[in-house]
Image (cartoon, rainbow, N blue to C red):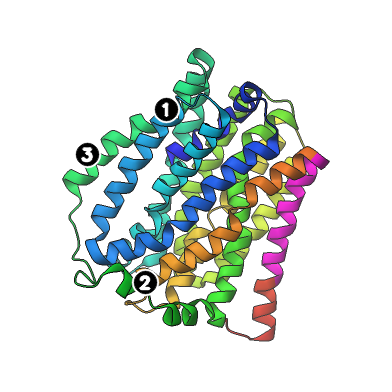
Amino acid sequence: MVGRLAISPVVPTVTAEFGVSNAVIGTALSGMWLAYALTQFPSGILADRYGERLVILVSVGGTGLVSLGLAFSPHFAVFLVGTVLLGGAAGLHYSVATTFLTRIYDDVGTAVGIHNGGAPVAGLLTPVAVAWVAARYGWRPAIAVGAFIAVPTFVLFARYVRPTEPRKPDRSMREQIDPGALLDIVTRPSIVFSSAIAILADFTWQALASFLPTFLIEHHGHSTALASTFFAAYFVVQGVLQIGVGALSDRYGRDLATGVCLLSGIGGIGVLVGGSGLLAVSAGILLLGLSMGWGAAVIPRVMDHLTAEERGTAFGFVRTAYMIVASTGSIVVGLFADRFGWGTSFLLLGGLMALGVALLVGNRVLGADL
């Protein structure tokens, strides 16, 4: 997560050095998220064959190497390719780690919420560290911060986390792919509905992860240091509160917890677009941080509709499917910002979250039980 987030605080500097627009840098970031999405499915297959631990180690190590390579990009084309590779390496982790947790813990929502807390920890450390390094040494060493985090993470995980037995060690990757069975899973009404909610929420998450600091700098005129501090606070709030979101979803239901997150996000977007003072921005960041804890409710919602045998390969496939669509968040918001301004582009995100709320309410009112 550090590797991917290290790019966002220096987006204005990168666009200035390479002479590209927000839409173009958004294309690179969308490419990163698309690659992240595409590796979710094969990661599950690899985990079934070789075990989750090995796949996670490959992901952490690869993320560190690519982060280091990005720092030496001589041209934007190289930077774009490196950004895509970064997403691919990082994408091997999440689905496998989630499946790993479901094999160990009964309170899946709480476990996923704690696991997802890794992102806010990265969000707390990364923007501040990147802004400080960028101010003193430039954006290239700042992006390399991901490599310095990856090495000790790799060593600690390899040393202390015990492997689990692969589910299907004797089956080749080709044998594990049953197109008919996968199509049956992704077309189940409950999976389709859960994926639709995930698309709306993840589209927003990816856009915010890419452009929230730039929005604060260019829309409100805040300094890079202050914008990075708010960006860090956004992830801290997300990390702390999403554990509560997971517990809420375990106790009172996935949809209630998801609805609370989406409504909070709508309020946060409205406050951020309308107010530029420190109090307004702080309130908006608090609300957005809560809203982006949606994964602790939506991911278990998907898992609830999969059998234990399906959760390895099938969850990766489902996650790939919804993240491919959601990966366009960065390029769409970047394009809207170029054409209509940052305020309009962020209001678009609020509208998508409102659509998510409407779907949840419709499901409850109609008694569809999706």
140 on left or right of 290 = left
Q: CA distance from mark 3 to mark 2?
A: 27 Å
Kind of residue at disc 1: Ala
**Along the line of sight, the residue nearer the viewer: 335 or 121:** 335
**Along the line of sight, the residue nearer the viewer: 73 or 307:** 73
Can see residue 248?
Answer: no
Q: Which mark is residue 311?
A: 2
Q: Which mark is residue 180?
A: none
- Identity of the residue drawn at 51% across and 72% down: 252
Residue 158 figure quarter: top left
Query: Element type at marker 3?
Result: helix
Q: Is residue 241 positioned above or below 83 on the image?
A: below
175 on left or right of 143 = left
Q: CA distance from mark 1 to mark 3?
A: 18 Å
Mark 2 neighbour density, 10 Å: few (under 14) some (14–19) many (20 or more): many
Kind of residue at disc 3: Val
Residue 64 is situated, as x and y percent measured from the top left of the image, at 35, 36
Q: Which residues are magenta?
A: 339-358
In the rendered image, which residue does mark 1 sit on? 144
- Identity of the residue drawn at 42% across and 81% down: 181
Kind of residue at disc 2: Arg
User: Upstream in the sequence, badge 3 or badge 2?
Assistant: 3
Q: Which mark is residue 155?
A: 3
